[in-house]
Image (cartoon, helix red, strand yellow):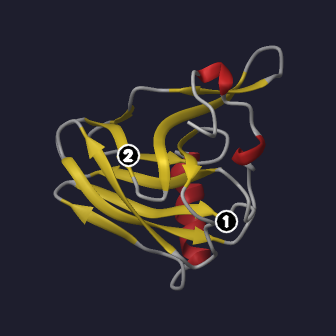
Amino acid sequence: MNRVLGLLAALMIAAPVHAHGVTQGEIEIIHPNIPQPAATAQAAGGYMGMSNNGPHADRLIGVETPAAKSAMLHESSVGADGVAKMSHVEGIDLPAGETVVLEPGGYHIMLMGLTKPLTEGEMVPATLIFEHAGRIEMEFMVDPPGGMDHSTMDHSAMGHSVGD
């Protein structure tokens, strides 16, 4: 619940300039964004809120974008030893009547092998793929720089690298 309240507060502060999204059927995508990476970055993280206003659960299972050679679903976590790690996930559950927030330090979309530099204010096309809702066309807004710099992380332990 705190994540939902935090997302709503952030959207209220950012509105009306930065609030954007798309609704298709029962699924609402709220402020999909990418913090502007360094001009030479080969990777970036994508974030958003996803609301399921329907009576049945769904699951985000994929992402496509021409902005990167590949886009994957990831989860960041901190182990009992205090070490942060990132892992690939096959999907992100979206329960009926709930909102799931993709944010730094949690679930996010990893854009690997950026095809060009991303500039603040730019809109980056993408398609989210859900098990039941199907394909949802949307755009990430490139927000001001900040947050986690995914371009400097070692992704080799996850079976892929920035150049893949």
Q: Is residue 28 above or below residue 112?
A: below
Q: Residue furthest bottom?
A: 17
Quadrant where the C terminus sits is top right
Front-most of residues 13 and 118: 118
Counting from the top left corner in percent of width and height, residue 96 is at 26, 40
Q: Position of residue 102 (x, y in %)?
A: 52, 47
Q: Please state which amino acid type lies under the numbered disc 2.
A: Val
Please identify the quarter of the rendering in which residue 120 is found. Answer: bottom right
Pick the front one: 24 or 2: 24
Q: Which residue is at a point 77% across and 14% down the rendered structure image?
A: 80
- The residue lying at 67 percent from left, 24 percent from top is 156
- Give left or right: position of 3 versus 136: right
Residue 132, percent from left and from top: 17, 39
Residue appearing at x 47%, y 44% in the figure = 71
Position of 148 with respect to 59 (left or right) is right
Residue 7 versus residue 72 in the image, above or below: below
Which disc, if any, is residue 63?
A: 2
Q: Residue furthest right?
A: 82
Q: Secondary structure at mark 1?
A: loop
- Residue 3 rendering spot, x and y as whole percentages: 56, 48
Q: CA distance from mark 2 to mark 1?
A: 19 Å
Q: Amino acid at mark 1?
A: Gln
* Image vertical order of residue 91 relative to residue 102, above or below: above
**Local crowd at mark 2 within 10 Å, few (<14), some, or many (≥20)?**
many
Q: Earlier in the sequence, mark 2 or mark 1?
A: 1
The vertical placement of 37 against 106, above or below, is below
Which quadrant holds residue 40?
Answer: bottom right
The residue under label 1 is: 36
